[in-house]
């Protein structure tokens, strides 16, 4: 069972873990990257365990305060914008809507980095508002197989693909993110299957394949938490590229077969 989005937070202020002023990997250009507190998933390879709990420590900020930080370095963000990440930004849906709507009015490019795990159609009115003010979605898909996804994260991937279908329905630009973890998400069969699955959705405009790394291990030690993947090695760039090619093979084969099927329809 997934967590429900947080109710409106103290005059629509958000619980923020940290802010990166000059981010270059979470959306196009140089960006102001806001790390939200709180995440319902417990991915075995998570490198931000300090963002899991929505409680303290956190900084309580309003959308106006964050946008004021943006304006201080606005000249650097000309081809960038603002990215909401975490944690899971959708847990603080009301605040996220407020931030993106205000940013959008100022013509700031808005990017949402999310797992989609909290998506529920019952909140479609709020998601409609959010997506109207969102320029790009980075959707993190942890695993295409639901049973393995549950072992890897503690949750079903059904809400994730429900959210992807919703994004497709709204015609929202999506880049899929997938972390390749040795012995968990590096199986060529499942990588090709992931490619075939996401090829169903016309909204998917790119695939960002990330390699597993151990940079979060020290955080676990500081928090007194056992690291679940102790002994796992960093993924090489060559292995990452190989995994990406597997996903693309599945993606292209599905799109090609669909095109052939369409051409063979008797008119």
Image: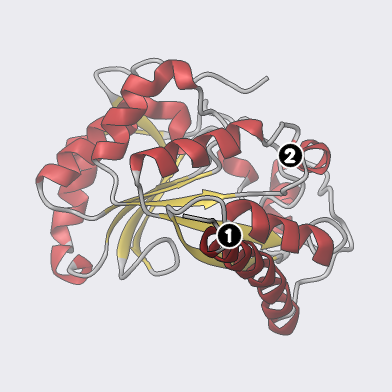
Q: Position of residue 202 (x, y in %)?
A: 45, 54
Query: Which residue is more in the foreground, 251 or 140?
Result: 251
Q: How many marks?
A: 2
Position of residue 257 relative to residue 35, above or below, is below
Position of residue 8 relative to residue 182, above or below, is above
Q: Position of residue 236 (x, y in %)?
A: 74, 79
* C-alpha separation, residue under disc 2 versus residue under disc 1: 32 Å
Other-residue count near label 1 (Cα within 10 Å), few / some / many at <14 / 14–19 / ≥20: some
Q: Secondary structure at mark 2?
A: helix
Q: Are marks 2 and 1 in contact (CB under 8 Å)?
A: no
Q: Nearer the viewer, mark 2 or mark 1?
A: 1
Q: Position of residue 109 (x, y in %)?
A: 23, 55
Left or right of residue 157, residue 127 in this image: left
Left or right of residue 15, residue 21 in this image: left
Position of residue 35 relative to residue 247, above or below, is above
Q: Residue furthest bottom?
A: 238
Q: Quadrant of residue 223?
A: top right
Residue in the picture at 76% in, 71% down: 234
Label disc, if present, on residue 153 of the rendered structure:
2
Query: Which residue is more in the foreground, 124 or 91?
Result: 124
Indicate which disc, 2 or 1, sits on the residue closer to the N terminus.
2
Label disc, if present, on residue 25 of the rendered structure:
none
Other-residue count near label 2 (Cα within 10 Å), few / some / many at <14 / 14–19 / ≥20: some
Label disc, if present, on residue 258 of the rendered structure:
1
Query: From the image, which quarter does the N terminus lie in?
Result: top right
């Amino acid at each position: 069972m997934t967590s429900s989005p947080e109710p409106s937070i103290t005059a629509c202020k958000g619980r923020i873990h940290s802010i990166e002023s000059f981010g270059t990997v979470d959306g196009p250009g140089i960006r102001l990257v806001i790390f939200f507190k709180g995440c319902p998933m417990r991915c075995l390879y998570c490198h931000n365990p300090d963002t899991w709990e929505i409680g303290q420590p956190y900084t309580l900020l309003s959308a106006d305060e964050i946008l004021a930080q943006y304006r201080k370095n606005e000249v650097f963000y000309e081809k960038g914008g603002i990215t909401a990440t975490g944690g899971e930004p959708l847990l603080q849906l009301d605040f996220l809507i407020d931030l993106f709507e205000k940013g959008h009015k100022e013509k700031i490019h808005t990017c949402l980095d999310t797992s989609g795990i909290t998506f529920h159609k019952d909140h479609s009115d709020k998601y409609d508002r959010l997506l109207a003010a969102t320029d790009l979605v980075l959707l993190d898909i942890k695993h295409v197989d639901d049973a393995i996804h549950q072992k890897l994260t503690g949750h079903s991937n059904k809400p994730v693909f429900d959210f992807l279908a919703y994004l497709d329905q709204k015609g929202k630009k999506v880049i899929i993110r997938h972390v390749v973890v040795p012995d968990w998400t590096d199986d060529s069969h499942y990588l090709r299957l992931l490619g075939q699955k996401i090829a169903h959705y016309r909204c998917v405009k790119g695939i960002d394949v990330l390699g597993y790394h151990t940079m979060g291990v020290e955080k676990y030690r500081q928090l007194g938490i056992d690291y679940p993947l102790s002994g796992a090695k960093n993924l090489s760039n060559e292995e990452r590229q190989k995994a990406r090619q597997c996903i693309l093979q599945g993606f292209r084969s599905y799109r090609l077969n669909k095109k052939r099927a369409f051409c063979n329809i008797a008119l």
